[in-house]
Amino acid sequence: MTMTVIGPGVPRGNPPSAGSVEIRELECFLVLAEELHFGRTGERLYVSQGRVSQLIRALERRIGARLVDRTSRRVRLTPLGEDFLGSLRPAYAALRATVDNARAAALGGGPLRIGFQGVAGYGFMEVVREFEDRHPGCESRITELPLSDPFGPLRRDEVDTAVVLLPVQEPDFVLGPVFSRQPQYLAVSRRHPFAGRAVLDAEELADSPLVGVAAPAPGYWREVQAPTRTPGGAPVPQGPAVGTLQEGLSLVAAGRGVMLLCRPTTEYHHRRDVAYVPVTGVPESALGLVWHGDRENARVRAFAEAVAGDLSRLGL
């Protein structure tokens, strides 16, 4: 990989104020001192190689001397850079410890109550475990949310944050990370004509009663989970409305209707009397982390950051 070559001397220009220390510059220098490679430093910091060069040049302008010698073949610290590194490491560690201690105090005050609608899969539970490892004073508790009441537990302060099926259009809620975008499947009785199909078109939803979701789930949300019309505008026969997923699957098995479900749910709920057939032409399902805007706190923000930082595991 070709490295950025900077000629002799520190880059000219108006130096940054010596009194305004930029933490990002210091973090970049510390990582570069370990890696001695601009590309790997960028990967660790989730920035481009060019951004690493910018941060290091800004720090050198702030100090007024070169900290790093770099050519197209090697990167090494200057003698001043070595001295600066020796002084910076303990100071930075102390700063991080101060922030971590304050954060731990803010995260106190009981467990983080997480509501989950659908299936809390392996990837999500790994994020929860890692969150608890990073914040040992903040235990988490997982609560299943009813299919027909995705937002009620948040409003009643029964959970601090919740993972719910989209969409979320509640004006008093904050929608955080969105993840687990998955194709939708149609749950049908093994006796249903669709049971042997490899795939279905969304227009075929007009051929069977669709199990819906009961109130108090809002109307816009129920319409997405059980649409009343196909994408082409044909009316979809309405089957019974249910309050829980198990009620819906039982009605499907009894031949009372069919039901749209996301793929993780079909993988978790194996039944001999129910078949799951992929449906094309309908939007993917997705999960979102939400919380009540009036009750946002450090624990909720820290958990949202943990989820946002691991979207690849959760299926962005």
Image (cartoon, rainbow, N blue to C red):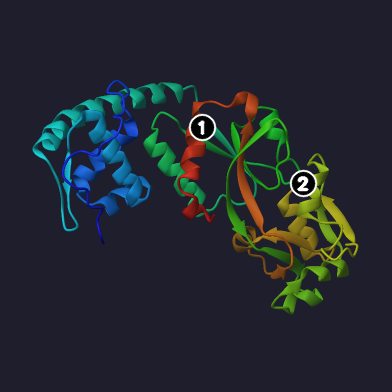
Answer whether labels 1 and 2 touch (C-beta < 8 Å).
no
Find residue 208 and report its image quarter. Answer: bottom right
Q: Tell me the quadrant of the picture where the N terminus can be found.
A: bottom left
Residue 273 in sight in this render:
no
Find residue 67 and report its image quarter. Answer: top left
Q: How many residues crowd mark 2 within 10 Å: few (<14), some (14–19), many (20+)?
A: some
Near-viewer residue (169 or 183):
169
The residue labelled by disc 1 is 301
Q: Secondary structure at mark 1?
A: helix
The residue labelled by disc 2 is 221
Vertical side of 155 occupied by 245: above or below? below
Identify the mark at residue 2; answer none if there is no mark.
Answer: none
Question: Which three-letter amino acid code belongs to the residue tagged 2?
Answer: Trp
Near-viewer residue (24 or 162):
24
- Tell me which numbered mark, 1 or 2, is placed earlier along the sequence: 2
Which residue corresponds to the image point at 22% horizontal and 26% vertical from the top-left?
Answer: 91
Residue 98 in sight in this render:
yes
Q: Position of residue 235 (x, y in %)?
A: 91, 62
Which residue corresponds to the image point at 42% horizontal and 37% vertical from the top-left?
Answer: 132
Near-viewer residue (189 or 40):
40
